[in-house]
Amino acid sequence: MTYLLVIGQSQVGSLYSYDVAFELDHPGAAKEPENLRKFDQLAREVKNLRLTKKVSSLIDIVKDMNQVLNAGDPEYYRIPESRDMVAQLLLLYENAGGVEAEKWVDYDYQRLRLMVEIGDYNSGEAARELRFIQERGKQLFPDAHVLLIGSISQFTVMQDYVTWGQVKSFFIFIFYTGLID
């Protein structure tokens, strides 16, 4: 077995991943606690999907910083109540040399990204889960654009097209063959 496969099957590694991006309706919307709570809710739901191994996002940074600034109290491992506190946490994180936030949110705080690592690939299950994520994302953020990004999401959609194309071709063949005889 190759090292890549061993690492991918371990607790810390993954061979497959895709991203879910949300373009919110205005700059700064990603600092709104209500939007972050909805995003956190979606992340928890995605984490419970069958194929999901791990999720990562800006939420992790915000919750960690909030807990650290409150003497490590586990009660504070949550999204703060006010927009100002969220903004201060993110500013403090960036000023302390944190560079990871730019992987999860854009400069204008209008676009959020969720990375989903999966442990194994099953095209049928992946298609169901990706549809769920898009539908659930639209329910939580009706004014946002929900984008599925990455080769796994593209491959899943492409495979779905090919499969249904083959099924349709088969039935067309049966129908025309039946007419010729």
Image (cartoon, rainbow, N blue to C red):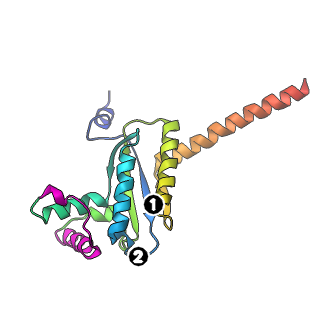
Q: Quadrant of residue 86?
A: bottom left
Q: Secondary structure at mark 2?
A: loop
Quadrant where the N terminus lies? top left
Where is residue 120 drawn, in percent x and y? Answer: 40, 35
Is 73 in front, or is 180?
73
| Residue that appears at 26% across and 63% down | 79
Instruction: Name the amino acid type tagged 2.
Output: Pro
Mark 1 nearby-residue class (10 Å; few <14, some 14–19, many ≥20): some
Q: Label 1, on which residue? A: 140
Q: Secondary structure at mark 1?
A: helix
Residue 68's disc number? none
| Residue that appears at 82% across and 31% down | 175
Residue 81 is one of the magenta-drawn residues: yes
Q: Is residue 75 left or right of residue 87?
A: left
Magenta residues? 73-96
Q: Label 2, on which residue? A: 27
- For residue 91, above or below residue 132: below
Where is residue 11 drawn, in percent x and y? Answer: 26, 37
* First along the sequence among labels 2 and 1: 2
| Residue that appears at 26% across and 76% down | 84
**Closer to the camera: disc 2 or disc 1?**
1
